[in-house]
Image (tube, rainbow, N blue to C red):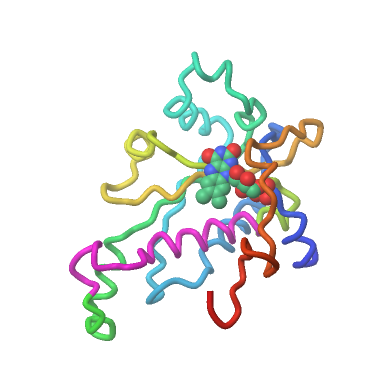
């Protein structure tokens, strides 16, 4: 797919076919995601990948049966792949304590980081994973772990102190189900016209 087309057609998918994603396709998507830029080349992000029957563990933790029946996005439960993404603050503290970075004063505590780069870099990885998946013809939904992140970390064996970034559902879109998310009516902000523009040239 042409890059511009990919960007302009990109939309979240909330209903999937149950068909599996071929191993080679998923591997390409995951490999793309680890190639993002990262602060100090720290690469402090990890992906826990659940495929097929493994995905039920995720829903068992986050969506108990009584809520599952009434869940608005039944087609999301069919997603054949769920990838949870975790940031690693400690990796950045360690990296920024190394000789070439020690002058930064960022090695000692998380609170010293005006911008937590483990979240920035994990976000880059998450976005790249989504674009790589769409480039393969897959659909994706990035969604939050919300109050379930600790329980998920425990169930998935994620080491302590990792920052939950979010979950990416991946699979072939169910084009028969086109229900939109609640935020779909929010208009895209203008590039630079009016007071609500995204771009501020020269100064805000
Ligand atoms: C950080 C983040 C968290 C999101 N969390 C959810 C979520 O919990 N549930 C959901 O249905 N969509 C979630 N979304 C998807 C957004 O609702 C969606 O990207 C937005 O409405 C724009 O729609 P589009 O991506 O289809 O253009 C999330 C997106 C991001 C970037």
Assess whether residue 114 is covered by the magenta stretch: yes
Lateral position of residue 41 relative to residue 14, left or right = left
Give above or below for 89 relative to 145: below
Lateral position of residue 168 relative to residue 90, left or right = right
Q: Position of residue 126 (x, y in %)?
A: 53, 56
Q: Nearer the viewer, residue 190 or 104?
A: 190
Q: Position of residue 51 (x, y in %)?
A: 56, 38
Extreme residue toward the top, this view:
66
Q: Residue at x 29, y 67 (%)?
A: 113
Q: Position of residue 66 (x, y in %)?
A: 49, 13
Extreme residue toward the front, this view:
195
Count of marks overlaid on the render: 0
Q: On the image, which quarter does residue 8 sit in?
A: bottom right
Give above or below for 150 relative to 162: above
Q: Residue at x 67, y 70 (%)?
A: 192
Give above or below for 62 relative to 127: above
Quadrant of the frame with the N terminus: bottom right
Give above or below for 60 relative to 203: above
Assess whether residue 129 is covered by the magenta stretch: yes
Q: Residue at x 62, y 25 (%)?
A: 72
Tell me the chief SS of the magenta region.
helix
For the magenta stretch, what is the residue range? Answer: 106-131
Q: Position of residue 94 (x, y in %)?
A: 25, 69
């Amino acid at each position: 797919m042409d890059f511009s087309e990919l960007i302009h057609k990109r939309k979240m998918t909330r209903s999937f076919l149950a068909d599996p994603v071929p191993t080679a396709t998923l591997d390409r998507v995951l490999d793309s995601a680890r190639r993002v830029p990262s602060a100090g080349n720290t690469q402090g992000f990890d992906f826990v990948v659940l495929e097929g029957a493994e995905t039920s563990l995720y829903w068992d933790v986050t969506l108990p049966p009584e809520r599952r029946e009434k869940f608005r996005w039944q087609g999301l439960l069919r997603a054949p792949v769920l990838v949870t993404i975790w940031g690693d603050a400690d990796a950045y503290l360690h990296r920024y304590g190394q000789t070439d970075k020690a002058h930064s004063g960022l090695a000692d505590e998380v609170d010293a980081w005006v911008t937590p780069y483990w979240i920035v870099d994990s976000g880059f990885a998450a976005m790249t994973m989504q674009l790589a998946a769409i480039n393969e013809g897959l659909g994706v939904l990035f969604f939050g772990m919300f109050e379930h992140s600790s329980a998920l970390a425990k169930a998935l064996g994620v080491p302590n102190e990792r920052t939950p970034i979010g979950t990416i559902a991946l699979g072939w879109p169910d084009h028969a189900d086109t229900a939109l998310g609640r935020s779909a009516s929010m208009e895209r902000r203008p590039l630079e016209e009016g007071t609500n523009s995204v771009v501020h040239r020269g100064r805000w």
